[in-house]
Image: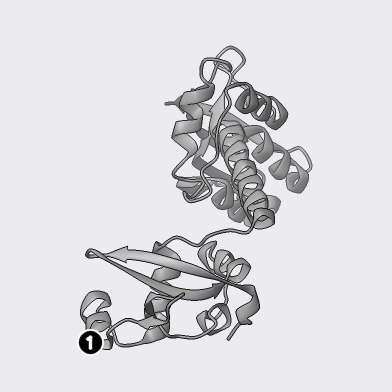
Amino acid sequence: MTNIDKAVIAKLKKEGKTYEILVDCEKALSLRSGKTISVSDVVVTDEIFYDAKKGTRASEHELEKIFGTDDKLEICKSIIMDGVVPLTADLLRKEIENKRKQIVDFIHKNVVDPGTGRPHPPQRIDAAMNEAKVRIDENKSAEHQFQLVIDQIRKILPIKCELRELMIKVPAQHGGRILPIIKKFGKLLSDSWGSDGSLNATVEIPAGIQEELEVALNNIAKGNVEMKVLRVR
């Protein structure tokens, strides 16, 4: 259990009622971001309240009915993951900065300048977001904000969302090490081995990471990589 001095009240409204718990703000955010952390380390107590400040406890019978379990830690986890966790000023700033970086990285990898076919540098994307006065919502995941941000910066940056289907061929001695790298970067559509042992693979990737993929493969294959764009969509 966490220290009550560091606690904030996390809230979830469900079926017309509000359920509150006391949590460590930073640990709750870590749990929400997918980090492995025990719920018991996040909460001050596993008690669930209608009003935490007044100490009004929620009915155990009602909790089981609403949440489908009588496991209080599981209920606490639901409140943390699906509810609202108020942020301290410092954590709010860090959370917004982190989500902004995630959004910039996503745009860099998934969209290109239609004039050059190359990705925009992260610094240019960040500057466009500033110019468009993009506001990052700390209560929404970066994934849920990507499209909105892209729509906002279109008037400033020429952008095109693009997927590329690539044919990749590497010599036999590098194939075993290359295939896992290809899978890491994109969706492997097919792979086969030639009569000379060479690897032939077809992969679909976001257009913005083609150059990064080429560099990664050539570092392993010592420049002996053949790559061809088969399709763009």
Residue 28 point in image, percent of width and height? 55, 69
On the question of residue 185 being in view, the answer is: yes
- Please tell me which residue is depicted at 54% across the width and 23% down the height of the picture: 153
Quadrant of image for the N terminus: bottom right
Secondary structure beneath disc 1?
Answer: helix
Residue for badge 1: 61
Would you say 69 lies left or right of 111 here? left
Is 198 or 84 nearer to us in this picture?
A: 84
Question: Looking at this view, is 51 or 99 the one in front?
Answer: 51
Colour scheme employed for the rendering of this structure: one colour
Residue 165 picture location, percent across and down: 48, 33
Residue at coordinates 50% horizontally, 76% vertically from top-left? 22
Q: In the figure, is residue 7 to the left or right of 48?
A: right
Q: Where is 120 relative to 175, above or below?
A: above
Coordinates of residue 11 in the picture (x, y in percent): 41, 66
Q: Position of residue 198 (x, y in %)?
A: 61, 46
For the C terminus, the quadrant is top left
